[in-house]
Image (spheres, grey):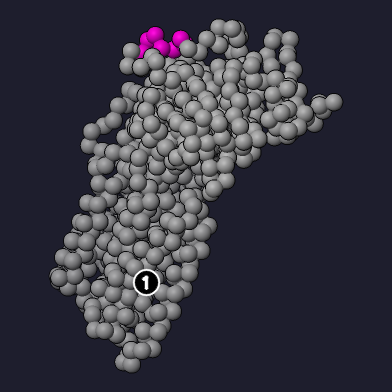
Amino acid sequence: MLTSALAETGPSLDPISDLNQLTAFPFMVNALEAGTIVAVMAGVVGWFMVLRRQTFAGHTLSVMAFPGATGALLIGLSAAVGYFVFSGLAALLIGAAAGVQTQRNRGQESAITGSVQAFGLACGFLFLSLYQGVLANYESLLFGSFLGITRGQVLALALVSAVTLAVLAIIGRPLLFASLDEGVARARGVPTRALSLGFLLLLGLAVAETAQITGALLVFALLVAPPATAQLITPRIGPSLVLSVILGVSITWVGLGLAYFYNYPVGFYITTVAFVVYVGVRLARAAAEHPTLLRRRVAAAEAA
Amino acid sequence: MSAIPAAQRTQPQTGGEAGKPPCAPSAPAVQLDGAQARIGGHVVWSEASISIAQGEFAAILGPNGSGKTTLLRVLLGELALTEGTVSVLGKPPGAQQGQIGYLPQRRHFEAGTRIRGIDLVRLGLDGARWGLPLRRSDGARVEEVLELVGASGYATRPIGRLSGGEQQRLLIAQALVGQPRMLLLDEPLDSLDLPNQSAVAALLERICRREHVSVLLVAHDVNPLLSYLDRVVYFGSGQAVVGTPQQVVTAETLSRLYGVPVEVLQTADGRLVVVGLPEAPAHHTDRHAH
């Protein structure tokens, strides 16, 4: 199934007619809905992940989609189930191992995370070689796909997102406290260990979900880039979270639209848009904080 | 700043309680009797009897590994004594949720931490509360402590962009915002430059006097603090010596506790200066103990 066959004309650059064209097919409506649900959830979970500097853990959990999908295939389950099981297991493993370490030992955490990642990938290869048949969609597994998302999958994604967001709403403030200042939070009675493990599990859920749209290797696009960009733009917590979600949803829509009109993988488009936005904001931030520019601005303000 | 005469400050038993009815005037802020602490079977200190009254400004001093932070852990209820008794604000340790503001020993916030200082301070009020922040926490109180620590000017900037001294002030504000009766600080002056050390020491004294909060801090170098302290607790050779600075900060006592010759000099305006401690290298380069 090739998208170009569906969209022979390309975008008209008239947003309304393009949007009509985008939503003309049910599979595309499903893709846009699924993408939006995932982007909202990833924008919020990713915001905490970026703040906690657990991007590497997030990446490792996303790579677990590989052993998850191949393992599920091997025993005849749906790939999504495999995603969730393996991401969850990896989250528990990283969380438990890191929890045993003394506080503030981020170096240890990343070593454990790396080991888990290597082992997970090895399992994936084993499952693949045990599975004698041909693995048809390995590309979409790694790089994402928006074709053939069913109503049932959209509903499942919505349910998982709702649960994830609800849990985050409840634990959000203590989690923020523990992320910024673990020692003080613990002294104030915040269960920092439990929160740390709980957050990794949520991250595992989020990543397993995101990977279904963007692919295992491109989770960065929705989980890292929008929150990192939002945090660069504003240090205010509420606006930063809202911005993260808006950026994630916009990037997803633009990426899906491009993939619809031009026949290259959706993961490529979403990731590229996210990357360009992030780099752009990063450069703008660096320019704004550059010492000579700052001095010039102060001088201008004083002259005025 | 250090112009308050020493005689006025060293009346700890009555200081700072008049304006605060909820304080039980009899219960000391910290009381240890015949206390012994062990870590991993090894005795850190024993037979420690320490009493610090409400509203006092006290420092915990001593060489590395002498058990300064261990005392804080005991007071926070993280470590149980193996002998003796301890009470904090008249109760066993760990039973004072919200009445103790604690500042652990820390490194700086990383430059990339893009959260506003004011939000960090607000976490001191509601950070341990579950659920959505539907009820706005007390903004006036946050403004008040920011004003008190002198951080109003930079409270809306990302904490990662602030200097060590500015971050330290915000952390003190965070510890203070919930109106605790006692502040416990682990090396709050560490990693600050000299002007910031004395400014933060002066700030802590102001908090102690004005907010009637007992302040107990661990420090490496007594000098920036010496003119403000009501009481010092020195750890060394497995024991604790407690008293007013005049009683404890003497060449004899310090030399015994540190096991190296230490001099205590008096400046023209009557302030004490400790010279020759192995952990204050800035002071013994030009003035050796002999």
Q: Quadrant of residue B117?
A: top left
Magenta span? B14-20
Chain identity of mark 1: A
* Residue B26 falls left or right of residue A291: left
Q: Single out the residue that lies furthest toward the right.
A: B290
Q: Which residue is mark 1?
A: A64
- Camera sees residue A150: yes
Q: Position of residue A86 (x, y in %)?
A: 33, 71
Taking the spot 29% from the left edge, 85% from the top edge, the residue there is: A74
Does B17 lie within the magenta span? yes
- Camera sees residue A229: no
Q: Position of residue B280 (x, y in %)?
A: 70, 32
Q: Position of residue B152 (x, y in %)?
A: 44, 25
Q: Nearer the viewer, residue A72 or B160?
A: A72
Q: Amino acid at mark 1?
A: Met
Does A236 lie within the magenta span? no
